[in-house]
Structures are given as C-alpha cells and as structure tokens.
Image: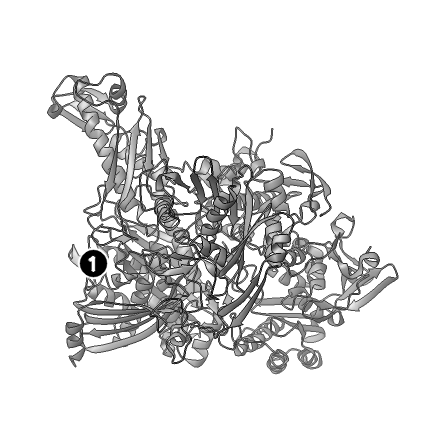
Amino acid sequence: MPEFRTVQCVVNDEPREAEIEPRLLLVHFIREVLGLTGTHLGCDTTSCGACTVLFDGLPVKSCTVLGVQADGHDIVTVEGLGSPSELSPVQEGFHEEHGLQCGFCTPGMMLTATGFLEENPNPTEEEIRWALSGNNCRCTGYMNIVKAVQWAAKKMATSGISARGARG
Amino acid sequence: MMAYYREDAKVLSGGMSLIPLMKLRFAAPATIVDLNQIQGLDYIEEAGGYLRIGCLARNRAIVRSELVRSRHPLMSSAAPTISDPVVRNRGTVVGNLTHADPQGDWATVMMCLDGEVVARSTEGERVIPVSQFITGPFSTTLMPNEIAVEVRVPGATNFGEYHKIERKVGDFATVAVGVALQQQGGSVSRVGIGLTGVGPSNIKCYDAERIVSGGGLNENTIQQAAQAAAADSSPRTDHRGSEEYKREMVAVFVRRSLHAAAGIRAA
Amino acid sequence: MALDEIQIGGLGARRKRVEDARFIRGKGNYIDDFKLPGMLHMETLRSPIAHARITSIDTSKAWMTPGVHMVITGDMAAQHNLAWMPTLSYDTQAVLATDKVRFQGQEICCVVADDPYIAKDACEVIVVEYDPLPPIVNPKQALAPGAPIIRDDKAGQTNNICYTWEVGDKENTERVFADESMQVVSQDIFYPRTHPCPIENMAIISDYNSATGKLTIYLTTQAPHIIRTAVALVAELPEHMIRVIAPDLGGGFGNKVPVYPSYVIAILASILLTRPVKWIEDKTGNLISTGYARDMYFHCDAAIRKDGKIQAVRVHADTDNGGFFSDAQPTKFKIGLFHSIFGCYDVPYGYLTAQGHYTNKAPGGVAYRCSFRITESMFFQERFMQTCAYEIGMDQAEFRRVNFIREFPHRTTFGFLVDSGDYDKCLDLALDKIDYDGFKARQDAARKQGRLLGLGLSCMSEPLGAGNSREYDIIGIKMFDSAELRVHPSGKAVLKIGSKTQGQGHETTFAQIVTHELGIPADDILVQHGDTDNTPFGMGTYASRSTPTAGAATAMVARKVRAKAKKLAAHLLEVSEEDVEWELGRFYVRSAPNRGVTITDCAFAAYTNMPDGLEPGLENNAYYDPPNMTWPFDVYVTTVEVDPETGEWDVLKFVGVDDCGVRINPMIVEGQLHGGLAEAFAMAYHQMITFDSQGNCIGSNYMDYMIPTAWETPHFELYEVVTPSPHHPIGCKGIGECGCVGGPAAFVNAVVDAVAHLGVRNIDMPCLSSRVWEAIKYKKDVSGTPPLPGQ
C-alpha cells in the first residue's frame, strides 16, 4: 500500500488539510480531493496550461507539481477569483470582450492573466501575448483574450481593484 | 539524504523535467527529495569573481535579473526562450542542467560562459565545469550521493545573444546558437560559442572560439568561425528540419551574432 | 410601439454570452467534473506498433493488481458481439484488436479499476506479443505490388483501396482539353494529416442502472441523438432506455462526432459491472487514435482560354484513410463535399475522380472545422488558382475576378447550387484594405534589397448546412434539424434544440432568433441542448450546420408559436384574426394601432383565458429540412515577410472579408472567425501529424503537435459584406468554419508568392522554416509527404 502524506495549505484563502499519496499531482489534489473542478487537465506534457493555478501568487501548471509540494503554500484557483457577488476585473474582461468560447482553457488563461496583471498592470498588446504564451486556446484565436486582458487592466486602473478582485 | 537513498532517489527543484518523466512513466523514483523546502537556495548573486545561481533560482528570476543582464547578457537572451512563461515560474537553471536533456538550452549557455556546477554531498563539495558535467543525453557526472547546489559563471562578458529557431513558444530548439564575448575596440579577450539541438548533446565550438579569440572580429574571422561552428555540429534530419538546414543555420546565427557584436550590418 | 430589437437582444445584437457566467467562475460541467456514486475508472492499453499480428495477450498480472475490477480484451468483447463496430462510412472498425493491430495507438485492452492511477498501473503489466508486419504510411505504398493487405479481415478485399468515386462530365471535359488553343496548367499538392485536437480530450461516463434497465451516457459528443441511435443499433438496446447527455464540451472541431472504441468498452463494462464507469482519454491517445483530418493528395489540370477564363478542370484526389474507413460524412459522398471545388468560379466543364486507401495510420477523416472535406477542396482550389495566374502571366486577383460567378443561383460544374453572393464587392474591399497595388510596389522594391515579401489571396464559397434530406444522410438518418419552443404563462420561454454547442454560443444566439421572431427579450429565454431525453431529435453541431438548420428550425417554430399567439391576441382584442397586425413583441388592431396586446399578454391568456375551441398552452416544435445549403463567401488576404537566410516568416498584415448573410450576433461571428483563422494559420505554420517509415506517429502530444500560442498567432483584421441567403428564414449562412477552410491557402500562397520569382510553385504545409529555406536554396518545390525523410 502506498504511504500517505499530510498536506496543509491555503486554497482560495481557506486553510485545507488532507492525507494524500505522494505521487498525486496537484491538479488531481485540487480536483479530486478538494472538489474544485474549475481547474482543468488538458495535456500530459506541461504544454497547454489548462491546469494553471496561482502558487504563492505566481501562475504554475498544476499538472507538473506534486500535491505534496503544496504543503505550506498558498494556492488560488478559478474559484478564488472575484467574490460571490462580484467578478474580478479579469473575469469581467473575459465576459465583456468575448474572451472565451468552450471555456475549457479559460480558468487557466484567467489565472495566468491575473498573475501577470498583478505584476504588470499596464501592459502592451505584445507583452500580453508573450505573458499568455504558456496557455493554449483552441477556440478564440487569442484576439479577444488579448482584448479581455486590456479591458481588465483598464478596469483595475479606474477602480483600484486588484486583478484577482475585491476580497471578502 | 542522498547518501542514504542513492540511486533510488531523485532530486526535485522546479520539477518541470522530472515530473513529466514520471507522468510518462519513464521515471519512477522510490523517493523524491524536494529541495523546495530548503530556504536560501534561490539566490542570484555575485561573489568571489563569480555570478552564482542557487539551485532554486527559477528561470523567471533570471529573465528579470538586472545583475545577470549586466554580467552575462547571453543568459538574459537565452532565459526567455526556455519553455514558456508559466513553466519558467517553476523551472530552474540548475534543474535544467542536471536533467541534461540534449535539447536543453542552459548547458549550451554555460559552456559558452565556462560555467561550473557546484556539487555537494556529505563528503564535501566539488566543482565541475559544465563542459565535463554533461556526459551525454540525460547523463551527467553527478554522483548518486551528490546534489547540484549551484551553477556559477566566472567574470563578465559584454556581448551575448542566443538565437533559437523554435516552431512555437515552448518548443525545443530546431537549432539554437549561443555567442558570448568580452571585447573592447575590436579586440576580444573572451569568447564562447555553443550549439543546441544539432548533436547528440550540447556542443561547445572550440575551433570557432579559437578563430575569434586569436584573430579578433573582422569579416574574415567571422566567416571562418561560422564555418567552423557548422563543421562542429552533427545534426540529424527530423520533423523539425533537415540535417543540411540545421547545419546551415548554425553558420547563419554564428555569423549574425558576431556581426552584431562587431557592429557590422548584415550583408 | 415596437420594441428596440437590439436592446432586447434580438437579431444583430452584440449580446454578451450567457454561457460565460458558469465558465468564468469555474462552474462549467465537463465530463471529468462528474462523480457518480460507486464510479470506476477505465484506462485503455494501446498498440505501440503500427502493423503486426497479435500472437498473445496475457492479462493475468493486471487481473491480480489490487483495485482492478475488470480487464477487457477483444476476445471478451467478441463474446458480446462487440469486437468490431460499424463506421459512419459503412465500413467496420475494430473495437479491441483480436487479429492484428493496424495503426500505432490502436486499442487492445481496457482495464477498469478503483482509480485511474491503478488502471494505468495495471495496463503496464499486460503483456502483448506481436509478430510485426511491414507498415504502410501513404497511398503509394498501399498500392505497391506485394504490399500486405491491411484489411485481410474483410472477405473479398484483395487490395488496399477502400473506395473509388467520380463526378462530372468526362467526355466534354476531355473535349475541351483536346482543344489546342487552350493553355493547360497542372499541379500536385499534398494536404498533410492534421488533427482537430480540442483541449479537452474524449471522455465518457457510462451508467447502467440494472434495476430500471436505463443506460445513461455522459459523452463528449457533438451529435448526441445520432449516438443514441447508433448505440441502440450496435448494442441492440432499446432506444427509449438510452439517454445520452453531452454536457459542456471543451471544444470539438469535428473530433467529437464519431463513436470511439473506448466508448463502446466503457458502456459494456458498466453493463457487465452494473456500476458507473468513467474513461478520460489522455492527449496522446487523442492525437494518435481519434478522428484525424485531411491527408489528401491532389492533382489538377485546368484548360484556360487566352483571356484567362477557365474552360475545364480535371481533378483527382487520393485520400489516406488509415486502417479503417471511418470518415464522418454523408452517405452518398465518399470524399465528403470535396466536389464543392471551384464552386465560386464559372467553370463550364469538370471531371473529378477520387480513390481512398487503407494505410497503417489512425482512421478518422473527420470534418475538422469544415463541411466534410471542403477545407481540402478550397485549399487546393486557391493554391491552384495562384499557380494558374503565375503560369498564364495574369494578376492573381484579376484572374480570380475573370472567373467569378455573378448570377445566382448558379449550378456549379460538379452539381451544387450556389444560392447568393456579391463576390466583386468582397474582393474589392479586401484588396483595398490590404493596399494591394501599393504592396506590389513594395514587394518589387524589397526584392531589389534582397528582402522577400509575399501576398497571398484566397477566395472561397463553402456550402454549409447539410442537408437537404434528398441528398444528405448519415447512417440513413436524413440531415434535418429541430427546435421545440415553449412559452410559459409569464411570457418567459424555453427553447430546446437538436444541435449541440461546443463553444459556439448556442445558448446566447438561438435565444436571439426567438427574440427576433417573438419580441421576448433574449434574457427571458432559456436554451437547452445536448440531452436526448429533453431535446428533439437533431443531427448535432458540425459542418457549420447549426444556424442554417437548427437556427432555421428555431425561426420556424417561433413563427408557429406566433401564429397561435395571434389567435389569442384576436380573442383578447375582440377582433377577428384578419384585423390583427404584428410588430416586434406586440399585436395590434390594424384600424386602431393604439389598441394592442403584448406577446406576454398572449402567453398568459394561453393558460388562463383561451377562446373556446383553442387548445391551451403556447408551444410547438419544428423540424427543418433545408431546401439548399447556404453559401457564405469569404476573401482572405495576407502579406508576409520571409527571412531569405533562415526561411522563417512573419505575417505582416491579415485582412478578412466575410459575407455570411445576416449576422445574428456579430460579436460571436467575429469570435468564430478568429478561431477558424488561428487554426488556418496553425496548419500553414507548424501544425501537422506525420509518420516515419515504421508508422510511428510524429505529433503524438503537444510537444510535437504544435498548436499556436498567443505569441505566434497573428492579428486578424475583419470586415463584413451582407448578402442574405434567399432561402434561410432569417437570411443567415453558416460561418463557424470559414476561416479554417479559406485561411490556409492565404498563408501558403503568401509564402509561395514571396519566393515565386525563384520558380517555386509549391511548398507543402506546414511551411516550416526548413522547407521554405530549401525552396529558396534549391529554387524548387518542397514536398511534405510521409514517411519523414531520413527515418
């Protein structure tokens, strides 16, 4: 029988604890153990970015991190963007600018955009395209995703709300 | 710990190479030693005449480091071409070197810059030049009881470019060429030329380096160095391109970089 | 006062999508998100080699792995008559290999276990022994003397040909070619194998309830109703006890139309184990075994008059169909709608032949973002038009213009009826926006400096919205579509459709059609789809057919509802029906326009105050059998710069002009075009699946199967022209796939144009830098046909 390890971490501002197999990938920990199915799994090669989450504030591909590595760290998934009553600027931008179609890449794309805008709140189109180049979208041709990020940047500038949205 | 587990264990830093291998079930280590729990290994600093990169320094940090840019512009040129922005948030320079993928970019860069790996074990510490560290595809001289804790690069260079043909962001190189120089007014005091993706492993172009360090930078030495580097490559035809194409691209990029260094506009 | 249609989200409104609310919060429902009580997990073991006889399969260690519930082999499936299944092209396909493997990645065994990690562990300890056979990776090898017969399972199959097909007027075509005043231009082009590859892979949960006998299948399918019928027929289960639910799909692009072997085994396993069984495909499985697209070899001759008018074309296409002929296409047509080629040009005579070949590659031939092999026909057409222009020394835009059709409807040389269009207007607009004349001057000047600029033009009209039912069916089911509309007492409505969104936004746009017809605000209309127990029978969503068929059905059912509402209005207004007039959202008395009732008033009356003799309720359904397909017209033009030393190329500018008739929601139309054009760029730039001489698939994961990122993908500049379809109820035409169909030729034409002065006429896609470099260096065409050189 495989041995189990205890993982304690903060996910979307809530402390979580679980006993998991050491080989369990972070994406499966998030989806299967924590039941947060907004984080998707697309490829097996760390390529597509559908599984992107924020790990201590930085976008990482959760299919290529072990669940046990989350111990002691802070994770944000799509469920942690915005608040129940209010969308985050990035979520709102994706809706306003038709930045999604099938929605499968969207959570990962939004988390990469969120991490990026926190670092660079006033980006050029070229910087946006570069920042998103670790996330694949098959539906949109990226045109409206770029516009969505620009929309979010503008919203952040005018409202003072962070990319991840107003908390609480 | 490595002394205890030896061959059964794998060291995890960024995990961007090891975990994919485990998912493909090419690797199934019984034990994983996660360095991420250890504080203070993510440094990028200058000390004792070396630019020192700790084994937890992520590619992300290299891309953003002004210190790196001022000491070795080749590193700053190469870092953004490694994988993609999200993977660079986890992946490390030292992890990339120890994985020794023949398509890895950092080994080429470090060969150009005479980089050295610092390996530590319970028995002490040893320093291995990267050109001797990598012994072949996925194979290094690191001992089972050792951990690579640092890569360090001596001195400084004032020119560096990494040219990489990739089919998309995140792709391995079809061909990549690194060129680094320390030069002043046409005289070259230090030169490094290295190749990725055009041989069974990374290639350091000793002949081309000798031509430039001996003759300085002029149209004649540039053309000769480009041909020498192309002769050092041993590419294979595959879905990325033909052998002939890759060899030719080595010459093109060595020439372009040396022209740029010499301030000569491309013909 | 009539309502402001745009304000209430009707036709033409850039209405924000209702689907977004769940997706941007991570609350979508994709199959992997479902967990059923007692659910088990399945993993499929695949063949590592392309062609071999299976000598033994030892599953004993897998059975002994703790947590494993069942290991299913082909022999076990055969006991249930499920080792083989029929394909959508009237061939058979192995579900699990019993005799031999015919392509790398073919399904051999399935393991059902407590969790997917255990199922994968167990697959690793299954021992399969093979007796290798020579692999065949292209049609030429398939036809070579002494080639092994791949389909030796089929009685009477003595070669590797899976179909032959022809259409056109051979005699008159030959007569034109015999005329010596004609200039004849010929060309061979290969369209490489590619793959739709949605980010979400295939998935199924099969849940068999042994107490009720009901089988519920959660499936990644673009066509749930067809699947239900297919399962009923293949598994001999009663159709009313099968429910297929296609929840949110993470893209489809044609890949999620067929029935795949692992689906069949998951269903079998859930029946045998009487527990829910989930199977989630991995990316490699998706790329190496599921419906690929294209893989076609094209030859064409054109006989051209001195003034540039094409007088006849002779076309031959060879398709590489893989190990099983399982193209998803209408029954009558063995090479899809490939004969739509030259549809936008006035070509008096044509003769087209086609032949299909079995090879040791994955089966499929799906309509990857196109209407059944139209992508191939339009690509070849526009590549060939450019070559013809070069060869006869005519400006390429002018050459197209000389040959355009201008009178509609127009019967094409291969028998289609083009419904409408204004081609000159589209071309003029596109050439103006790209600065066509200015570019030619810049191109000449750049060449003198050793720089290579190129311009690529692609014009095409695509028949979208199959059927009519006379000509189009899939496994015998005619290609209509359907809608059901129910208006509740308070005036809110539910629309149920037979098609199925995979990201196109049906929940948003189909409501807008109802709004247009009834004046009910779009926000008050719920659109349901994708559940066979709760929606009318439809053929599903692919081939850009939803708006032309289900969209038309939606307009028609709304009109039926409006007709009944009119009776209710007459009753409420106490006038005769003939005296009642309609404006958006409201009936009024013709002679007293201020006296009126809203559609909401009528809906309430339908349940509370109906006249004597009128059935209560306000609902209806419509099955729409389109009289013809709809014919959008598109012009794509792009400029590129090629690095003469490295062969790398960059898009300088891209302009698209699309005429898809009336746009229900312009925002969504543009989104569809962006997506299609990005895939077009991908195929031209780097996206391909190829094979080495051993039949190993190159392009089996996202490291080698290149799908472009935001960084590589160019900016698309779009313009519109509107020529309503004369037969569609609201004048719409299909659009979802036009960018993907017409786009590739624009990019390749641009790259070839940059090097055409060297005598280059063709570089096979994708135009990898190495291929472009080779064309420049050796001043010759570059082939990309498998097997890969040097391996």
Quarter where residue B182 is shown: bottom right
Lateral position of residue C39 relative to residue A15, left or right: left
* Percent coordinates x, y for residue C12 in the rendering: 30, 39
* Percent coordinates x, y for residue A128 in the rendering: 53, 50
Quarter where residue B180 is shown: bottom right
Lateral position of residue C590 relative to residue C760, left or right: left
- Chain letter of disc 1 in the image: C
Residue sitting at the far right: B123
Q: Is residue C592 visible?
A: yes
Please state which of residues B155 and C18 is positioned toward the viewer in this rendering: C18
Q: Amino acid at mark 1?
A: Phe
Q: What residue is disc 1 on?
A: C416
Task: Give the answer, above or below, for where C162 lies relative to B17.
Answer: below
Q: Which corner quadrant holds the N terminus of chain B? A: bottom right
Please state which of residues C251 and B62 is positioned toward the viewer in this rendering: C251
Q: Is residue C706 visible?
A: no
Q: Which element is circle 1 on?
A: loop
Task: Give the answer, above or below, for where C394 lies relative to B60.
Answer: below
Please state which of residues C184 and C727 is positioned toward the viewer in this rendering: C727
Task: Give the answer, above or below, for where C600 lies relative to C33.
Answer: above
* Percent coordinates x, y for residue B216 in the rendering: 68, 79
